[in-house]
Image (cartoon, rainbow, N blue to C red):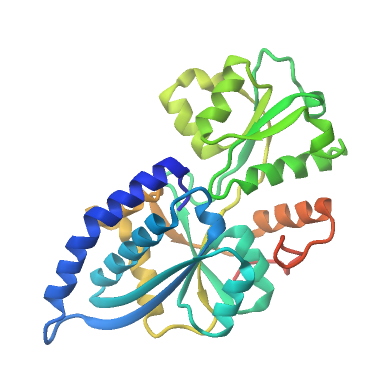
Amino acid sequence: MNLRPAHRRIGWCLLAGLCAPALAQQLASNVAPGGLRHTRLRVVASGRVFSGVNRNDARAALKVWFDVVAHDRGYALDSTVDIVDSVAEIRERLRSRSVELVTLGARDYLELESSNLIVPVLTDARATGGALYSYVLLVSPSSGTTSVASLRGKNVLVSARGSGETGKAWLEVLRGREKLGRAVSFFSSVTAAAKPQACILPVFFGTADACVVDEINLHLAEELNPQLGQLRVLARSRPMIESVLAVPADPHPDQQELIDSMQSLNRDPRGRQLLMVFKTDRLVRIQPGDLDAARELWRDYGRLSGPQTAESGPADRGKGGR
C-alpha cells in the first residue's frame, strides 16, 4: 500500500467518491431479514504511511476498501478508520482492545514487536518479484564512480516508498558500514525527491551525482525508458518488506475471514481495481524471516543515530517475525 503522494491523492479521491455510494446502496439493500451479518472493524493506520497525503481522502478510501472486503464475505460492516501520528497511541489502542486491524510501516511494527500485543499477517506484493524488494544506489556509467567512498562531496537524491524514510536510512547505514563519517559531512547534499523519476532522471542526465531508489520504481522507469537501464548499480540493499497489516494478539471473532478475503482481492475485477488504487498487485501472508532485513536495517540505523526512545526508532529486537 505504498503510493506516491500525487497518485495516492487522486486514487483515494476516486475510490472514495465512486465506490462509496454504490457500496452504501449494496449494504442497504442487503441488510434486510436474512441479509448480511453485522460486525465491527476498528482500523488504526500509522501517519508515517500517509506522509504528504490528505488524511480525509486516505481515511475515506480505506473505509470503502474494508467495507467492500467485508461485503464480499457477507458482512454489513460498522467500520472506523483512524490515522495516528505516534506508535505510543497505537500501542495504547492495542492495550485497550479498541482496534481490530492496524496498517503500518515495517519500522512502526518493529517498535511494537516486543510488546507482544500485535501479530503481523499481510504485506503487499507484486505479480513478479513477490513482497520483498531492494533499494539501489545508482550512478551514471560515465561518472567514473566506482565505490561509495568516491561519492565524497557529491550530491545524492533519495526516493523511497511509503513515508520516504527507508531510502535515507539505508544510505546512512551503507555509509556507516564503510566508515565514511556522517552523511551531513560526507556528501555535499542529500535531498529527498518527490517522485522516483525526479530521483532517477537527474542522474541519467548528469545533474545529480547519485540517487537511491527502490528497485520496483526503477524497473517501472526502465519499462517506460529502456535507456535508463544504462545506469549502474553501485550498491544494493537486502530485499525487505516495508508495509505491514497486523492484528491484535487477542483475535477478533471474524478476524480470519477478514484476512482471507483481503488475500483474495486479486481474484475478481473489483478487488483488482481496489488494489490498483493502492499500487499493489495482491496481499500475501508475511512469512518467517520476511521482516529480518528491515529489522537489521533499523537496528543498524539506530546504532548510528545513538540512543533512541521508543518513539524515535526500534531498538534491538528478538529474531524472526511471527
Using the rendered view, name the quadrant where residue 160 is placed.
top right
Specify whether 152 is left or right of 110. Answer: right
Rendered view: 190 above or below 134: above
Rendered view: 49 above or below 203: below
| Residue lying at 59% horizontally and 79% vertically, measured from the top left | 92
Picture coordinates of residue 273, whole percent (x, y): 28, 50
Specify whether 138 is left or right of 1. Answer: right
Specify whether 320 is left or right of 84. Answer: right
Front-lying residue, 257 or 274: 274
| Residue lying at 69% horizontally and 59% vertically, measured from the top left | 295
Specify whether 286 is left or right of 142. Answer: left
Rendered view: 249 above or below 143: below
Front-lying residue, 317 or 102: 102
Using the rendered view, name the quadrant where residue 213 is placed.
top right
Task: Name, please, the residue furthest toward the top.
Answer: 142
Picture coordinates of residue 118, whole percent (x, y): 57, 75
| Residue lying at 58% horizontally and 34% vertically, measured from the top left | 193
